[in-house]
Image: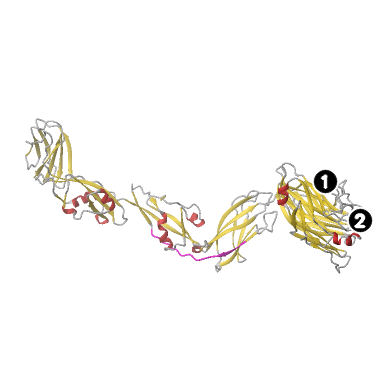
């Protein structure tokens, strides 16, 4: 059902005019300009005795190539209390904003709706406005000649070929007439760089072409005209400057060149309308001026408290969208807690036209700040940077801070170094439970620097290789479940060396029985294995297999009296640092006497003389013909020397005068055969 408001008799002075002040409604900054289409619903000037009006009319939109629609604003008006449900190209339109004015006891109305989506869908072509019906009360206006109706669409478009331009749309409903001869309108929030290609447009209602008594339009105190359509003494005369029409009955859709009328640096335009007779209502004014100003706005993306330092970390985004100039670096940003200023920062780089910049500020919270408070950010609070719109610089966010408890001195993560170069892999998240005190609701991330941890940047991933050898540290950032608080702790990293042990030589025992089995004291090899390490710092265990040594299972129970199971046999040794738990594994051979007889060469007549000896001994055998390998071992099986020699007439002589008195073993090998003899030095 249509919403038609019928005329009501108003007991208002017939000489009064009541309306709504013209003021800024919306600004567009970019490579923009504007045009307009529209039409009247009057079939002739309203001074005609006929009292009729149309319910629809049409107009044509033609944007040029390269011109892209930005916004479309529909205004309609008539001599009635109001009709706020209409149609555009068959689409139902309901007024989003309304205006009213009373003159000589009669009400007049205007209405507004954003129709951008309809114009985007239809593009260039014919637009038909319909279904505005004010006929029920029209007769009340015909007597005084103020019956009218009409509509217009203000089109803002983008064109890359244009200069940076500020398009400002002002609206309201104000009037001049025989009883109120002048109307002053001051357009503010204008920022003029130059007057190049600047212009101003008007949408006005009820002007009559035949009435030009004391009528004028002044811009910045200059009477303007737009010949031949708009005479300086009859600016509102039923014309359309966009189509060069002079039959837009009782409606004016005109624009004027502002070249020479505005100056660089101007921030307002003064408009004065005069009329001694004609009743004229101004519904909207639109300006386009060359402008180069930023438009800083700010949004708080989130905030998290840092109770350890009595600080708050604020993430925010600065935008420079509705702008015609770069937003300079160091634009000030001020923060407030429940209206009390507590910190300031600045943008750290230039924000381009249409661009955004997200930053983080860490600021000290005032003492006594409650756990629930309103956080406000204001950009360019002092107005030091001229901007297109100073009314959109604030943003508020309600903050709730929850406590967080962590272990601020966690145990170091320790790993063992396989190559003792001081670097190794760490699984950092192995420290989570220690740091969070086992609280599963806390989230932990790790960072290379304290600053990264405080700002939540550059999270480290597992596995992590330390940066400094042997002793290093990383920083853990712990955030509570609702993200309102965080803590930072230092996590030490320690790379422990593997024990720097050496592989001992063969442990040999000559029992003389030739059965290949003996009882060995494996522990006599410990000093050789540790190679000067402090025995009290290490655990040394012996194993029969490498797997047992690696898994630390099935160690030899009595290594000081171990009976071999094969001859020779490999014994594995696990040496573990009692402080770090790091270990290394080595091995050595154990061997006892055996009867050697391989092939046809068995040294059957081999002898060592003299034995005992104090100086030297001679090895003699008829079978000592080819090169011989001869080795000397002490009673603990330690190799003292080994040498290859060529016998002379079946004999080899060795000097042992430098060795201490004691029992030694001589190992003689040739052509794959080996024999071991005991030697006494005295």
Which scheme is used to colour this image of the protein?
A: secondary structure
User: Is the N terminus in the top left, top right, bottom left or bottom right quadrant?
Assistant: bottom right
Residue 208 in picture, x, y percent from top left: 89, 54
Residue 526 in picture, x, y percent from top left: 21, 51
Residue depicted at x 9% and y 30%: 649
Q: Is residue 507 above or below residue 439?
A: above
> Which type of secondary structure does the marked residue at label 1 adopt?
loop
Q: Residues within 10 Å of mark 1 (few under 14, many from 20)?
A: some
Instruction: Identify the mark at residue 661; answer none if there is no mark.
Output: none
Highlighted range, magenta: 396-411
In terms of sequence position, does the residue under pointer 1 or pointer 2 come before the other? 2
* 580 left or right, relative to 295: left
> Could you tell me if residue 532 is visible in this image?
no
Does residue 101 belong to the magenta stretch? no
| Quadrant in the picture for residue 317 | bottom right
What residue does disc 2 label?
A: 50
Q: Is residue 96 above or below residue 605?
A: below
What residue does disc 1 label?
A: 243
Q: Cα distance, mark 1 to mark 2? A: 27 Å
* 303 left or right, relative to 180: left
């Amino acid at each position: 059902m249509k919403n038609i408001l019928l005329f009501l008799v108003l007991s208002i002075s017939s000489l009064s005019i009541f309306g709504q002040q013209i003021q800024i409604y919306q600004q567009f900054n970019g490579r923009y300009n504007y045009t307009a289409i529209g039409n009247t619903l009057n079939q002739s000037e309203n001074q005609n005795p006929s009292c009729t009006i149309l319910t629809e009319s049409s107009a044509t939109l033609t944007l040029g190539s390269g011109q892209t629609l930005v916004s479309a604003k529909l205004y309609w008006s008539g001599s009635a209390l109001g009709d706020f449900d209409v149609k555009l190209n068959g689409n139902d339109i309901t007024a989003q904003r309304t205006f009213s004015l009373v003159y000589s006891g009669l009400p007049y109305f205007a209405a507004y709706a954003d129709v951008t989506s309809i114009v985007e869908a239809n593009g260039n072509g014919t637009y038909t406005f319909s279904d505005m019906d004010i006929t029920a009360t029209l007769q009340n206006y015909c007597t005084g000649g103020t019956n009218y109706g009409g509509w217009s669409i203000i089109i803002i478009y983008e064109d890359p070929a244009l200069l940076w331009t500020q398009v400002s749309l002002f609206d309201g409903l104000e009037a001049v007439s025989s009883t109120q001869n002048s109307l002053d309108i001051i357009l503010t929030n204008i920022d003029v760089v130059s007057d190049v290609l600047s212009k101003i447009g008007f949408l006005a209602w009820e002007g009559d072409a035949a009435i030009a008594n004391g009528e004028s339009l002044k811009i910045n105190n200059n009477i303007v005209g737009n010949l031949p359509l708009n005479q300086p003494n009859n600016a509102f005369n039923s014309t359309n400057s966009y189509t060069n029409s002079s039959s837009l009955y009782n409606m004016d859709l005109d624009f004027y060149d502002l070249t020479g009328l505005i100056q660089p640096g101007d921030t307002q335009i003064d408009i004065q309308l005069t009329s001694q007779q004609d009743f004229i209502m101004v519904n909207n004014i639109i300006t386009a001026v060359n402008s180069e100003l930023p438009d800083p706005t700010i949004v708080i993306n989130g905030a998290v408290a840092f109770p350890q330092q009595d600080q708050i970390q604020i993430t925010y985004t600065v935008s420079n969208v509705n702008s015609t100039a770069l937003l300079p670096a160091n634009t000030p940003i001020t923060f407030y807690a429940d209206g009390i200023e507590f910190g300031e920062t600045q943008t750290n780089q230039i924000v381009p036209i249409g661009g955004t910049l997200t930053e983080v500020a860490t600021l000290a919270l005032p003492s006594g700040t409650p756990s629930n408070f309103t956080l406000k950010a204001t950009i360019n609070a002092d107005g030091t940077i001229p901007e297109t719109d100073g009314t959109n610089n604030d943003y508020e966010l309600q903050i709730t801070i929850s406590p967080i408890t962590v272990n601020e001195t966690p145990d170091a993560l320790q790993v063992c170094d396989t190559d003792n170069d001081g670097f190794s892999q760490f699984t950092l998240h192995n420290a989570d439970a220690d740091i969070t005190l086992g609280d599963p609701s806390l989230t932990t991330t790790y960072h290379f620097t304290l600053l990264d941890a405080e700002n939540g940047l550059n999270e480290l991933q597992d596995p992590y290789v330390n940066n400094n050898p042997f002793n290093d540290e990383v920083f853990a950032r712990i955030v509570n479940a609702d993200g309102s608080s965080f803590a930072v702790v230092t996590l030490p990293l320690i790379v422990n060396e593997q024990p720097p042990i050496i592989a001992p030589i063969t442990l040999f025992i000559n029992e003389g029985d030739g059965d290949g089995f003996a009882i060995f004291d494996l522990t006599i090899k410990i000093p050789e294995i540790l190679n000067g390490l402090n025995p009290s710092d290490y655990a040394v265990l012996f194993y029969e297999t490498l797997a047992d040594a690696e898994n630390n299972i099935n160690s030899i129970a009595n290594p000081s009296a171990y009976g071999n199971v094969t001859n020779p046999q490999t014994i594995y040794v696990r040496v573990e640092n009692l402080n770090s738990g790091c270990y290394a594994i080595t091995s050595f051979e154990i061997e006892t006497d055996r009867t050697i007889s391989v092939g046809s060469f068995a040294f059957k007549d081999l002898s060592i003389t003299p034995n005992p000896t104090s100086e030297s001994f001679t090895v003699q055998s008829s079978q000592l013909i080819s090169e011989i390998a001869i080795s000397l071992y002490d009673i603990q099986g330690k190799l003292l020397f080994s040498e290859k020699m060529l016998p002379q007439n079946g004999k080899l002589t060795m000097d042992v005068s430098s060795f201490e008195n004691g029992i030694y073993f001589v190992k003689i090998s040739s052509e794959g055969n080996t024999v071991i003899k005991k030697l006494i030095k005295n």
